[in-house]
Image: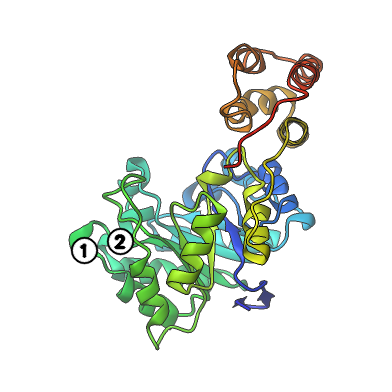
Amino acid sequence: MPKIGNIILPDFPLLLAPMEDVSDPPFRRLCKMHGADLMYSEFISSEGLIRDAMKSKMKLDIFDYERPVGIQIFGGDEEAMEMSARIVDTVQPDLVDINFGCPVKKVVCKGAGAGVLKDVDLMIRLTKAVIKGTSLPVTVKTRLGWDDASINIDEVAERLQDIGVQALTVHARTRAQMYKGHSDWSHIARVKNNPRITMPIFGNGDIDSPEKALEYKNKYGLDGMMIGRAAIGYPWIFNEIKHFFNTGDILAPPSMTDRIEAAKNHLIWSVEWKNERVGIVEMRRHYTNYFKGIHSFKEYKQRLVTTDDLEGLFNIFDEIADVYSNYEFDVK
């Protein structure tokens, strides 16, 4: 069973990826209910934490029911990374994760996220700064390299482990790929098979079904896998994968009742955490995913994303439940 510091994870754990504007406490709570073994906060700017930026500070909120949980930070300045690690330490998550994988331009241009893949020496200095600033286990999430001509994950893994990083998650794409094209897990398997590597190695990228999860588990021999986009609006994927691992059977898809209950809980918890106005507005991005592929649903989706009060939204959910009471979903 993989171990990160004092955290003992189950055999082949399923991790929820840190996703900006997605992996907040309400969403993490749903994923925990449905089988996620280890979760991470949205990524947090080290500079934002130091400035006491409200949005960054709010991302530090964690709750006992979601443990084990890690807080992920990013940045390109050693002093800021050390100081932000000290701030994270005060709220006592189970671990601190460093984002060296985010490919978006506004992060990369600041010499952070995947931008650090072009300067492994800087990556090591930033990581040392975080380790210095916290008493918690430090883990890293990164990519294969900057582009196909500079895949350097083998060197990165060895050097990170040498300075004390306790687990590594690799998104099996380069920064140049962004989220396009196929991920190539063979590079991660090579890292795992390196006799020098003793820390847990987790894979990430393109896991969107129980069948693919089992195929990749058997083919690449890693310690676990991280699931991101496939869990958005579909937190059931974690238990579906575990059930398939254990039995070889595909679980029946969540019913309309299941989907409505998840969406309502997500909405209620978002309102409790953020406030009513913000919770309602920010929840709108999730409805399409909860009710994806449902025939003649456009009218209800439009009403869900334009209604401004909880009572009105609950009335719409009740109406959906009545209209689609006998709706049958196809197995994914």
Query: Image quadrant of residue 312?
Result: top right
Q: Is residue 231 above or below residue 186?
A: above
Residue drawn at (32%, 42%), measured in percent from left and top? 105
Residue drawn at (61%, 41%), measured in percent from left and top? 331
Q: Which of marks 2 and 1 is in front?
A: 1
> Dot 2: what SS?
helix
Looking at the rendered image, the quarter that the C terminus falls into is top right
Residue type beneath disc 1: Ser
Frontmost residue, 142 versus 236: 236
Say whether residue 17 is left or right of residue 148: right
Mark count: 2
Residue type beneath disc 2: Leu
Which residue in the structure is indicated by mark 1? 150
Which residue in the structure is indicated by mark 2? 117
Give the colour scheme of this rendering.
Answer: rainbow
Q: What x and y, as percent, mark residue 257?
A: 78, 32
Q: What x and y, as percent, mark residue 22?
A: 57, 40
> Dot 1: what SS?
helix
Label 2 CA crowd tier, 10 Å (few <14, some 14–19, many 20+): many
Asked if one can make out residue 38 in the rendered structure from this viewpoint, the answer is: no
